[in-house]
Amino acid sequence: MLGASELTTVAAVREQRSYVCTVRDNYGERDEVVVVPCEDGDAAVRAWINRCTHEAQRFDTGRGVAMRDGQMICPKHGSMFDSCSGDCDNGEAAGTTLPGVEVAVEDGTVYLADEDYTFVHEGTITDDDGDDGPSSTSHIGF
């Protein structure tokens, strides 16, 4: 696919439940994209920013997305997001929708087709810099 970055295959996403990669937005900031299986019409996969809308918890930390019945499960509070629409109708994130990322599928291969993002590398942001973010988000000291 001309001008698009090859990410993975539909078969790999289905087998592993998800695929995660690091991208750079138009402002130069890095973010993560997660590709998940989707059974909606002709769409074999969908891609979302790899964060719950409630507290920015990552769905995939490099070990795959927890999924049940076509829904992505936030590991922090259990909110469930439809893997095809990105909509959440339960838990702390109810009434929100995940930010989508455009991908295209051609001959079973998944490509990053969103002009707002540039592929950086496979895996999470922390896979290349050793920075896991803050050690705690708690404001309580002991």
Image (cartoon, rainbow, N blue to C red):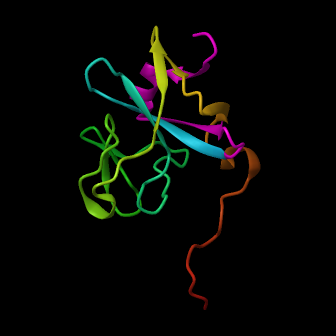
In percent of width and height, residue 122 lies at 63, 33
- Residue 8 belongs to the span the image colors magenta: yes
Q: Is residue 96 magenta?
A: no
133 versus 97 height, above or below: below
Q: Nearer the viewer, residue 130 or 24?
A: 24
Q: Quadrant of residue 52?
A: bottom left
Side (left or right) of 54 relative to 126: left
42 relative to 66, above or below: above
Q: Quadrant of the N terminus?
A: top right
In the rendered structure, which segment of residues is drawn in magenta?
A: 1-29
**On screen, 41 above or below 122?**
above
Q: Is residue 48 left or right of residue 27?
A: left
Question: Is 24 or 17 nearer to us in this picture?
Answer: 24
Question: On the rendered structure, is 46 left or right of 80?
Answer: right
* Image quarter in which the C terminus is found: bottom right
Q: Nearer the viewer, residue 115 or 84?
A: 115
Residue 109 point in image, percent of width and height = 50, 15
Identified at 31% across, 37% down, the residue is: 85
Could you tell me which residue is drawn at 47 percent across and 42 percent down?
A: 64
Q: Give the x, y percent position of residue 51.
A: 48, 51
Q: Residue furthest bottom?
A: 142
Q: Locate residue 57 relative to residue 41 in the image: left or right.
A: right
Residue at the spot 30% in from the left edge and 45% down from the top edge:
87
Q: Nearer the viewer, residue 127 or 125?
A: 125
- Residue at x-position 53% and y-position 39%: 33
